[in-house]
Amino acid sequence: MNAVFNLSALSSSLKESLEEIGGAKTSQDLEAVHSKYFGSQGIFSSASKSIGSLDKEKRKEAGEFFGRCKKEFDAAFLKKKEEVEAEEEREKLLSERVDMTLPFTRFPMGSLHPVTLVQREMERFFMSLGWSLGDGPEVEHAWYNFDALNFPPDHPARQMQDTFYMAPEESNLVLRTQTSSTQVREMISSPLPLYTASIGRVFRSDTLDAFHSPVFHQCEGLAVDEGLSVADLKGVLEALVSSLFKKKGDVRLRPSYFPFTEPSFEMDMLLEGSGKWVELGGAGMVHPNVLKSAGVDCEKYTGFAFGIGIERVAMLKYGIADMHDLVEGDARFSHQFAMGD
Ligand code: PHE
C-alpha cells in the first residue's frame, strides 16, 4: 500500500468525519463535511483515485476497505441529513406561521352615488325601449340653450332660469340651464324618426338648500315621429315611473308654460298605494318653432319632450330628505344605497 492509500490515515479520517457529521447543525454544515472528505480535494476522493494504480492484490483489499468507509460515511451522512432537514423544515414552518385568528385589514367596497344609480336605471329603461342615448356639452352656446328653443332675445322667459353666463359676454356661452339644449342638437344630427334620451348636469344660480342645488341633473326625453300625440308622451312617462319605482305609476299632466313646447305641462306622478301626487318635471309637445330651428318639417312630424330632475327621483326613490346629503360627497352616505351596480 503506498502513501496515498493509507488505511490507518483513512480510518482516522473516517472517525473524524463521522464526528463532524454528528456535530453538524445545518445542511450547509453537512455539505461542508461531505466536500471536505469526498469533494475533489477530499482524502477519500484521492484515495479512491489511487486504487487503480495499486498492485492487484492490494487493490482488492483497498477497494473493499474504501467501500466500507464510504458506506459508513454515507449511512451516517444520510441519517443526519434527514434529521437536519426535518429540523430546518420545522423551523421554516414555525417562522411562516400565520395566526388565522388575527383581525384582517378591511378594504371597503366602493358604491355608486344614488344619482348615478338613478341615471343608470333610467338609461337602461330607455335602451330597453330602443331609444338612443344622447349627450351634449355642459358649456353650451346660448343659441342651443335659449334661441333655438324659442326664447326670443328679449323674452322674460330667459330670466325664468337664473343663468351662469361665461366670460366674455360676447362668447354667448352659458352653463346649460337645462338638458333641453340637447333637443336641437339631436334633431340636427340624427335621422328621423328620433327617440332619444339624454341625462346630464345642468346649472342654475340657485343657492343650495334642502331642495335646490346650483348643480343638478336632468333627464331629457325627446321623440320626433309622424303622428305622435300627448297620449304617447303620457304612455312613456307612466312606463318610466313604473319601472323606476317598481310599482304601477300614474302620471298627471297639468297645463304649464315652456317656450319650447306647446302645449306644455307640469307632470306629477302617483305611485300605487301612495295616495299622494308628487311633481316630477316638465313636458310638452315640441313647439313647431323648435322643429323649424332644427330643420324638421313640422307639417309632417310632431314631437314630444320631457325633462325630469334626477335628484328629485333619487330623493323620492330612496327617501332622501335633504339635498345637502346628495351633494356633500360623504362616501358613508352613498354606502347606504348599494354595494355597486
Ligand atoms: N327644460 C325644462 C326645465 O328645465 C323641462 C322640460 C323639458 C319641459 C322638456 C318641457 C319639455 O324645467
Image (cartoon, helix red, strand yellow):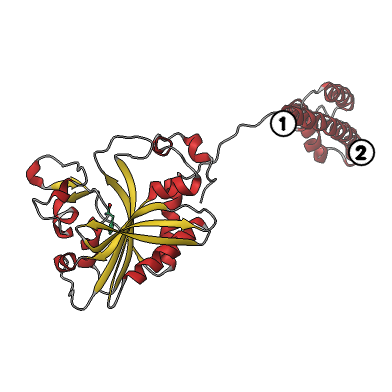
Residue 198 is left or right of residue 262, and the answer is right
Quadrant where ligand 1 appears: bottom left
Q: Is residue 191 visible?
A: no
Residue 332 is left or right of residue 61, and the answer is left
Q: Based on the displayed image, in which of its 4 quarters is residue 195 positioned?
A: bottom left
Q: Residue at x 44, y 67 (%)?
A: 128
Q: Residue at x 17, y 50 (%)?
A: 157
Badge 1 is on which residue?
98
Residue 42 lies, in percent from the top left, at 75, 29
Task: Give neighbour class at mark 2: few <14, some 14-19, many 20+ (Cα, 10 Å).
Answer: few
Task: Give neighbour class at mark 1: few <14, some 14-19, many 20+ (Cα, 10 Å).
Answer: few
In this rendering, is residue 122 above or below 29? Answer: below
Q: Based on the displayed image, in which of its 4 quarters is residue 108 positioned?
A: top right
Q: Residue at x 32, y 39 (%)?
A: 213
Quadrant containing the N terminus is: top right
SS category of the residue bearing label 1: loop
Residue 95 lies, in percent from the top left, at 72, 27
The label on residue 229 is none
In this rendering, is residue 147 above or below 108? Answer: below
SS category of the residue bearing label 2: helix
Badge 2 is on which residue?
64
Q: Is residue 79 visible?
A: yes
- Give, as a three-letter code, the residue at label 2: Glu
Residue 255 is left or right of residue 30, and the answer is left
Q: Residue at x 82, y 32 (%)?
A: 86
Residue 200 lies, in percent from the top left, at 32, 51
